[in-house]
Each structure stands twice: as structure tokens, then as C-alpha cells.
Image (cartoon, rainbow, N blue to C red):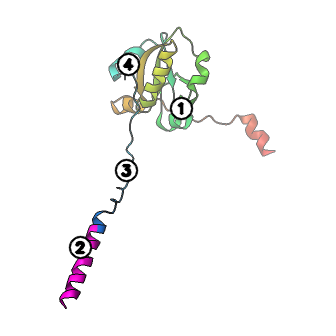
Amino acid sequence: MFKKALYLSSIAVLSTATFAQQPATPAAPAARVYQEPTYKAKKLTRAEFDALLAHPERILLIDVRRPDEIAAIGGFPVYLNIQAKDLKNHLSEIPKDRILVTVSNHAARAGVAADLLADNGFQVAGAAGAQTYETEGEKLFKPASPKPAAAAVEGAKQ
């Protein structure tokens, strides 16, 4: 009986030692957290942006959002729309005689776009967020969907 107890306790000690030597199970990956892109451009305050908008002859707004974002959220009455992913391919189409303000929803993409423009010799005042601007009490321009021309409607009926 003593041998049997000694045998069982030896097995228990060995199995504990073996278990303790097992590599730890890797921890589950942490949940992905959105990290705002980093940029050097100035994020314009509402007052700074309004001061620039007061002189439309000096500035050019470049909205780097997708057209569906602009339609759904709104934007500003006059702007040049070049999506952030395409901006590098359209630098030659952007006038260099204006001060540029880039626009996105909360200025993150606009900040990255502003850095690209500044690195390519453009005068950039900074980046603005359309939704941020609206949250701070201003109204955004929401373009109406164009109505089909009467001739096109008549042609479709035939």
C-alpha cells in the first residue's frame, strides 16, 4: 500500500512539473483600436477656417472625401474634390497660386493630404473637418441630387 501511495504521489509530482514546463498559451490579440493618422499640418480651428473662408479669392478647398461622403454628410459650397487615395496623381492639376485648405470628415485624411501637398511645394493653411465644423455650430452645404433632364426622361419613355 505504501508503494502504491508513493507511486501515485510520484506521478502527481511529475505531471505537475511537466505541466509547469508547458509553454504559456499565447494571449488573444488585443482588439484593434483605431489610431488616427499622424500628420504635421495644422488642424484649423473653426475661427481660423472661417477667417480663410471670408476670402474665397485667396483659397482653394480640396475635399479629399469620397463623393458619397460629401453627399451624405455635406461640405462647403465651392471646393475641388480629389479623393485622398488619388491626390498624388493629380498634383499637376492643382493651382499653386492659392492657399490650400484640405477637408475630410474630422481632418485626419485632410491632415495627411495637407502634408503631401506641402511636401510638393503648395501653400497649405491646414486641414479642416466638415463634421467637426458642423458639430461646432456651423451649417454644411448639402448638394441636391441633380434631376434628370426633361429630354432624357422623354427619351427613356419611348
Q: Residues within 10 Å of mark 3 (few under 14, many from 20)?
A: few
Disc number lying in front (1 or 2): 2
Q: Nearer the viewer, residue 77 or 18?
A: 18
Q: Which residue is mark 4?
A: 50
* Residue in the picture at 40% in, 20% down: 41
Amino acid bearing label 3: Ala
Q: Which residue is mark 1?
A: 143
Q: Residue furthest top?
A: 97
Q: Residues within 10 Å of mark 2 (few under 14, many from 20)?
A: few
Q: Is residue 140 above or below residue 50?
A: below
- Residue 31 is tagged as 3
Sequence-first tag of 1 and 3: 3
Q: Residues within 10 Å of mark 1 (few under 14, many from 20)?
A: some
Q: Residues within 10 Å of mark 4 (few under 14, many from 20)?
A: few
Amino acid bearing label 4: Asp
Tell me where residue 131 appears, x and y as whole percent. 40, 33
Sequence-first tag of 4 and 2: 2
Q: Which residue is mark 2?
A: 13
Which span is picked out in magenta?
1-17
Tell me where residue 63 appears, x and y as whole percent. 51, 26
Sequence-first tag of 1 and 4: 4
Q: Nearer the viewer, residue 37 or 43?
A: 37
Tell me where residue 108 appears, x and y as whole percent. 42, 30
Disc number lying in front (3 or 2): 2
Name which quarter of the figure residue 66 lies in.
top right
Disc number lying in front (4 or 2): 2
Q: Residue furthest bottom?
A: 1
Q: Are marks 4 and 2 in contact (CB under 8 Å)?
A: no
The CA span between labels 4 and 2 is 75 Å
* Residue in the picture at 53% in, 29% down: 84
